[in-house]
Amino acid sequence: MNLRLHDKISYRGEDNEVEGLLDYQLDEHILRLACLRGPGRARFLEPPTSEMADRMLLFSEVDNLDIATPPPAIIYHGGESYLLKVSGTAQIAIAGQARDRQPTTCALWRYRAAGDQFLQIEQWPDRVRTLAGASVHRSMVDIRPATSKDSKDSKDS
C-alpha cells in the first residue's frame, strides 16, 4: 500500500488527511508512518508492508509514559507488558508536514504486547516522543486517494 500526501483516511467515523510521510531507515529496512491531520490528538498510520498483509498499525502520540532512554527491554504500561521488538538509530526522511519532526536521526524502540498493542519510543534531538496504538484490520480503514483539488486546497490554507 502506497500512501501519498493528502490521501484521506477514515477510521471509526473519524476523517483524517495524510499531511506528512516519515521514513525511518533502520539498517536494512524502512518503517513508514503517515502523519495524519484530523480532530483530536496526533495520529500516525503504518500501512501494511505488502499487498498480502491484512493489518496496519494506528498510533496516537501519548505523553503519559514517563521513561528514560534507552528504555528497558520490557515496559509495563496500561496494564500490559510490552516486549522490545525493534531498536536502533534511524535516519529520518520526511515529505510534507510531520508534527514538529525534522529530517535528522533519532533513536527508536518499538515494543509489542498481547492483543497486537504497540509502543514506539523515539529519542529526537529536542525531546522523547512516544506513540501507542494497535494493529487494525485493513477493512476497518477507508483510504481514499488524494485528488488534484485536495492538493490545491491544502496549499491555499
Image (spheres, rainbow, N blue to C red):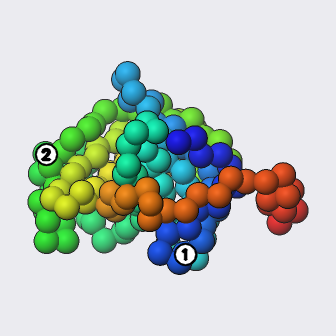
Would residue 35 be seen by someone viewing this image from the given angle?
yes
Q: Is residue 154 above or below residue 91?
A: below
Q: Amino acid at mark 1?
A: Glu
Q: Is residue 11 above or below residue 88?
A: below
Q: Residue at x 48, y 57 (%)?
A: 44
Q: Residue at x 19, y 61 (%)?
A: 115
Total marks shown come to 2
Picture quadrant where residue 87 is located: top left
Picture quadrant where residue 58 is located: bottom left
**Measured from the top left, where is residue 60 in percent x and y?**
42, 65
**Measured from the top left, where is residue 4 in percent x and y?**
65, 46
Q: Quick one: 138 or 39, which is closer to the camera? A: 138
Picture quadrant where residue 146 is located: bottom right
Residue at mark 2: 73
* Circle 1 residues within 10 Å: few <14, some 14–19, many ≥20: few
* Circle 2 residues within 10 Å: few <14, some 14–19, many ≥20: few
**Measured from the top left, where is residue 109 in percent x and y?**
29, 44
In the picture, measured across the screen, residue 43 lies left or right of residue 26, that is right
Q: Name the quadrant of the C terminus.
A: bottom right
> Looking at the image, do the residues carrying marks 1 and 2 touch, with CB atoms under 8 Å apart?
no
Q: Amino acid at mark 2?
A: Ala
Secondary structure category for the residue under label 1: strand
Q: Residue at x 50, y 69 (%)?
A: 11
Q: Is residue 60 above or below residue 24?
A: below
Residue 14 - label? 1
**Measured from the top left, where is residue 124 in percent x and y?**
43, 46
Q: Which numbered disc, 1 or 2, marks the residue that appears first in the sequence?
A: 1
Front label number (1 vs 2): 1
Would residue 72 be seen by someone viewing this image from the given angle?
no
Secondary structure category for the residue under label 2: loop
Q: Quick one: 108 or 34, which is closer to the camera? A: 34
**Looking at this rendering, what residue extends furthest in the top direction?**
28
